[in-house]
Image: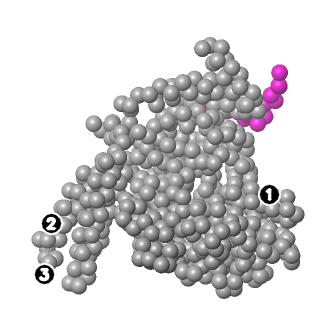
Amino acid sequence: MACGQNSMLKLYRNLLRESKKWCNYNYREFALRKIRHEFRKNKIIEDPTKIQDCYVKGLQSLETIKRQVIIGNLYKTNKLVIEMDKA
Amino acid sequence: MLQSLRIILLKQWQLKKCRMLHTSISQLIEISVSKSDEDKLQATPTLGRALYLDAQATTPMDPRVLDKMMPYLTSYQGNPHSRTHMYGWESEAAVDHARQQIADLINANTKEIIFTSGATECNNIAIKGVARFYKEKKNHIITTQTEHKCVLDSCRFLQGEGFKVTYLPVMSNGLINLEELEAAITPETSLVSIMTVNNEIGVRQPIEEIGSICRKNKIFFHTDAAQALGKIPIDVNKMNIDLMSISGHKIYGPKGIGALYVRRRPRVRLEAIQSGGGQERGMRSGTVPAPLAVGLGAACELANNEMAYDHEYITKLSNFLIEGITSQLTHVIRNGDPVSWYPGCVNLSFAYVEGESLLMALKDIALSSGSACTSASLEPSYVLRAIGTSEDLAHSSIRFGIGRFSTIEEINYTVINTVKHVNRLREMSPLWEMVLDGIDLKTIKWTQH
């Protein structure tokens, strides 16, 4: 099946990796928080068709994130004050 | 240079003469001095951008919303009202889908959703439209003193046309008294307009109770839900809402679009303000902007799916903010009801601190002392005045707006800096010294020179 544990883990890592490319602090942090939340929440699902649905949704989200990271980073701004403090 | 500073100071002095009783001159001087600092700040690109904590003014667009809009901004340029070719059909299908997404969020029928340019236009159409349509038989409108400016201004405009308007007062927690509402209803009343969540203090009016009172008396009930939609559950049938204003840019959607819900059973009729091609059931002529409509629909669907998650997260941040500030500072007053309240809007008054000085000191955080429409004036907020906040406390209030994209780090930074600057500004104030010495300021007899 397309969504064994390995492919699911790969999707999770890809989602996080793509989200980290976001220059916009708020979008980046939201994406990371939301991805982690969704995977944690859906960990208990055992029905294979539901898992497949989640997997497809994840793949679509990955495409959305890829596109939006490109658009967002075309028009990036200065970093926020809290990011400056960290650096 | 000195001359101009003196003129600025003199102007500030005249503006704030009445406020001198409550704030010290050193704080006031800081406002005019820091004005030039601000110019310097804008010129230095090395400084970081301010944090955004003004979610009531507008929200950043969700990237998922933009993703849904992009095709209609680039490839599908059709006019959704064009019936003769495929470009029109594509756009029409997209607009219809968006209408469905909005209707699903509020449990309405798609035919009851009218696209407009925003909540202000919705409020204008709803109030003026209904009032004028029924003016032969009924010429009385009820609203509250804490409504948004566009509702109050529409009502004032109608007063000029001969309508009677009752502006209900609110209690000190910002909520209306239902008995007063019932007492204000007359056989001539055609419309009651009360907002769901207040834009300045975040209180939630008892919409369901107001709805049932209006239905019982056969009066139309309009609510401005711009600040409430997508943040708290709204069901137009359960709450007996007849007309509802929706704004796109308050729910992480695009700016420049809104929607008006107009009930069909029992039917609400209204006189259109805009004449034209008769789009949107004749209530709002003009081409529906398909990309913006798609964006509003997508924002509504996201809100529908993520309302509980967002609400829990925002409540957590909001509690962290309030506890962080109130545990480290005394004489901080929270405005608005602490129970019937949307946690994303925190309005605090810092006694003995000039609100504007504090906003200037916190210039790396985008905050506001009240609604964005009135943020240009130094007048204290009329909403705070309506809930009985004294002049000095109304001048020292700050609104913190927390949204989906706020983070705990941002709130932490805000707490640390707010505490730091409030303490610094208070140390400048002789009044604060007196308070620390235990002198009750109200017993002092001030003499004017």
Q: Is residue B270 above or below residue B415?
A: below
Tag 1 residue: B156
Numbered label attached to residue A10: 2
Numbered label attached to residue B14: none
Q: Is residue B100 above or below residue B411?
A: below
Label 2 in the same subunit as label 1: no
Region in magenta: B436-449
Q: Is residue B270 found left or right of B436 in the rendered image? A: right
Chain under callout 1: B
Question: Between A57 and A44, which is closer to the camera in this rendering?
Answer: A57
Where residue B346 appears, as percent x and y from the top left, is: 55, 52
Give the CA separation, mark 2 to mark 3.
Answer: 14 Å
Numbered label attached to residue A1: 3
Determine if the magenta segment contains residue B443.
yes
Q: Residue at x 36, y 39 (%)?
A: A78
| Circle 1 SS class | helix
Amino acid type assigned to the residue bearing label 1 in the image: Arg
Q: Residue at x 49, y 43 (%)?
A: B366
Question: Between B430 and B164, which is closer to the camera in this rendering?
Answer: B164
Magenta-colored segment: predominant secondary structure: loop
Amino acid type assigned to the residue bearing label 3 in the image: Met
Report if the CB atoms under discs 3 and 1 are less than 8 Å apart. no
Where residue B305 appears, as percent x and y from the top left, is: 41, 72
| Circle 2 SS class | helix
Q: Is residue A64 found left or right of B289 in the rendered image? A: left
How packed mark 3 is, by other alpha carbons closer than 10 Å (few <14, some 14-19, many 20 or more), is few
Give the CA separation, mark 2 to mark 1.
Answer: 61 Å
Give the CA separation, mark 3 to mark 1.
Answer: 66 Å
How packed mark 1 is, by other alpha carbons closer than 10 Å (few <14, some 14-19, many 20 or more), is some
Q: Is residue B217 above or below residue B296?
A: below
Colour option used: one colour
